[in-house]
Amino acid sequence: MRKALITSILLVASLGGFGQTILSGSEVFGKDRKEGFYMTLNIEKKFIEKDWSLFISKYGGVAQSREVFNIAAANIPDISPDPINLMTKVISDQKVKTKIFASFDVGGGNMVSENNKSFRGVEQLLKDFYAFAMQNEDVRLAERDAEEAQKNLDRVNKTGDRIVRDIEKNKREKEKLLKEIENNRIELEKLLKDQTDNKQDQENARIALEEKQKAASVVKTRIK
């Protein structure tokens, strides 16, 4: 587990609909421990890393190393008119929770604290990021839902296409069966006719046999 020292208590909550808690605390950067502020968001770390890097890039060039995002000379007039050494971390809290830690060195090792007038600027920065991140999360969720809906549409369309193919196959098989039935009917009629003709042939052959036998008897009688 990450051993992050949280050195003080709850600072702010409402901020007029912000509804997000900011905690003061500290994090280690290299060998130095820096005082700063935490904020937790119910968004996966991989998304927060992308959003946070993009969000703070407007204050200066971002140097990133794994979960650390720093700006050596950040230009944030709402916090200080002088360049700020902004040192931040994006920390995975749970699977879908992520902490943002930010330390603001306004020069000479002087860090913005909750008792400092510059803290209002820190509040606003974190508030703006929260809104930015949540808006992006809403977009991601909407796109995910749209993608799932598209997949579902593709799935039911694929099923529909398969049903159409099966119907056409069934029709072809039906036509084949009907043709076979018709051929079978014709063949049966022919067989029945052949049977009738054969019975007549049998009768004719029997009569012919009887006549031949009678004729043979007459010839034999004459010989005697």
Image (spheres, helix red, strand yellow):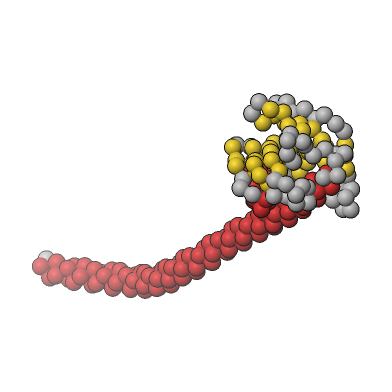
From where the camera sits, is residue 34 visible? yes
Q: Is residue 82 above or below residue 201?
A: above
- Where, by quadrant of the figure, is residue 151 drawn? bottom right
Left or right of 158 on screen, residue 144: right
Q: What residue is at 36 percent from the left and 72 percent from the top?
A: 190
- Where, by quadrant of the figure, is residue 204 drawn? bottom left
Quadrant where the C terminus lies?
A: bottom left
Q: Nearer the viewer, residue 200 or 224?
A: 200
Left or right of 220 on screen, residue 176: right
Q: What residue is at 17 percent from the left and 68 percent from the top?
A: 216
Q: What residue is at 71 percent from the left and 43 percent from the top?
A: 84
Q: Is residue 139 above or below residue 222?
A: above
From where the camera sits, is residue 49 visible? no
Q: Nearer the viewer, residue 31 or 203?
A: 31
Left or right of 34 on screen, residue 217: left
Q: Position of residue 60 (x, y in %)?
A: 64, 49
- Where, by quadrant of the figure, is residue 8 drawn? top right
Q: Position of residue 166 (x, y in %)?
A: 52, 63
Q: What residue is at 46 percent from the left and 68 percent from the top?
A: 172
Left or right of 43 on screen, residue 194: left
Q: Position of residue 87 (x, y in %)?
A: 69, 38
Residue sitting farthest toward the left? 223
Q: Nearer the viewer, residue 169 or 185?
A: 169
- Report the number of discs: 0
Q: Nearer the viewer, residue 203 or 1?
A: 1
Quadrant where the N terminus lies?
A: top right
Q: Position of residue 218 (x, y in %)?
A: 17, 71
